[in-house]
Amino acid sequence: MPELRLDQVHGRPPLECEWQTAKGDTLAAAKAERAEMVARLHRGERVERTKRTVSEAAQAWLERGRGQRGPWDPVTRERYERVVRRHVLGSVDPQRRPLGEMKLRDVTPDRVAEWSQCNEKRLASSTAQLALIALNRILRFALRRGWMGVNPVACLEPGEKPQGRAGEVRILDERDLGRLVAHAGPYRVLFQCLPYTGLRIGEALGLRWCDVDFDAGLLHVRQQLSRRRTPKQLKTPAAQREVVLAPALVTLLREHWLASPHKAPGDLVFCTALGRGLNYREVGEGFRAAVKAAGLTGPGRLTLHSLRHTFTSLLIAKGLDVVFVSRQLGHASPAITLSVYAHLFAQAQHAAAARAVLEESYQTMTGTQPREPRGPGSCPVVPLLAAGESGPAAP
């Protein structure tokens, strides 16, 4: 196999500099690889000839165990290890060679696109997206160490990445919320608080009595509960916030405090009989059981997060500005709030004006007097869609 030393390009003796060998099946291939290595050197990139596989890079990345926000928590580590084991070291298609067996230098954008599209066909959308996210971070880790010249995931076209297939998200009105709470059993107070505080489920389960200011009518969101039922840092710094409480909710929480055997400032607001944090899975099962018992059927998905969407829709419908809504939700910036709820802000701002213009035009056309809408069905209900989703097809 033809070999060329990298130092030969610079015309310096081998002993005066560190050098590597560019190899290829032919002299032309070896020269092409040497040229690529020289170009990377000129760009200031680290160059290291390696025979490492994707699997070895993935293992090194898992051992490092750090992200942009520092070391992973146990749940994040477990999730990444599971994704790597199933979708990098293994393959969803038994007829295809696992990506982990390939050498890093042989991984191309086309091969990654083929792997990702196969995942999208056979896996849930969120799982296929997480697999590509994990692979991107593995290859970015390898690129940083000079094991690769380019990250193939960064070269993918948008259409080659898994696309979300989420459907319409449903908002509950007051009657539906009442039916849900009536069948909530031991989670009654929790399911009353979620749609009127907008807390993420982890934030609600992490609330302590010292976080509830009964006199000021505020909740101080300072931590969340992990899936292992231990205190955990909030999702972002912006998630640490003060949430306004309605007077009726202050009364509800005060009654819950009086009835609870765990009243100390550091005790959890929502806990088991022994004072331990609630189990995520059991709360989710309780929500689904309450939805079924209440007979809440119809279009759109109903999840615990739907209660957070319901809270947002209530604020927007009353004309509150995006900055305030964003702070109540704990979003990192108002831009995130707008990207998810832009259609609701548009409706709140323009629906009344549009209705008046249309009524005036109709009156002119027919020569009739304008009629005031009557009854609860007169106000149109616009379903909440998450970012990137599309509404029902026009008739």
Image (cartoon, rainbow, N blue to C red):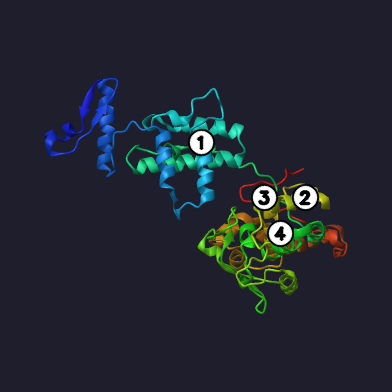
Of the pair 364 and 88, the residue shown nearer to us:
88
Numbered tag placed on residue 85 in the rendering: 1
Whether residues under marks 4 and 3 lie with C-beta atoms below 8 angstroms apart, the answer is no
* Cα distance between the residues tagged 3 and 1: 24 Å
Q: Residue at x 23, y 33 (%)?
A: 20
Numbered tag placed on residue 281 in the rendering: 3
* Cα distance between the residues tagged 1 and 2: 33 Å
Q: Quadrant of the N terminus?
A: top left
Q: Callout 2: 10 Å neighbours few (<14), some, many (20+)?
A: some
Residue 376 in percent (x, y) is at: 85, 61
Whether residues under marks 4 and 1 lie with C-beta atoms below 8 angstroms apart, the answer is no
Residue 186 in percent (x, y) is at: 76, 59
Badge 2 amino acid:
Ala
Residue under circle 4?
310
Badge 1 amino acid:
Arg
Q: Is residue 348 visible?
A: no
N-terminal-most mark, 3 or 2: 3
Label 4 sits on a secondary structure element that is helix
Q: Callout 4: 10 Å neighbours few (<14), some, many (20+)?
A: many
Residue under circle 2?
289
* Cα distance between the residues tagged 4 and 1: 38 Å
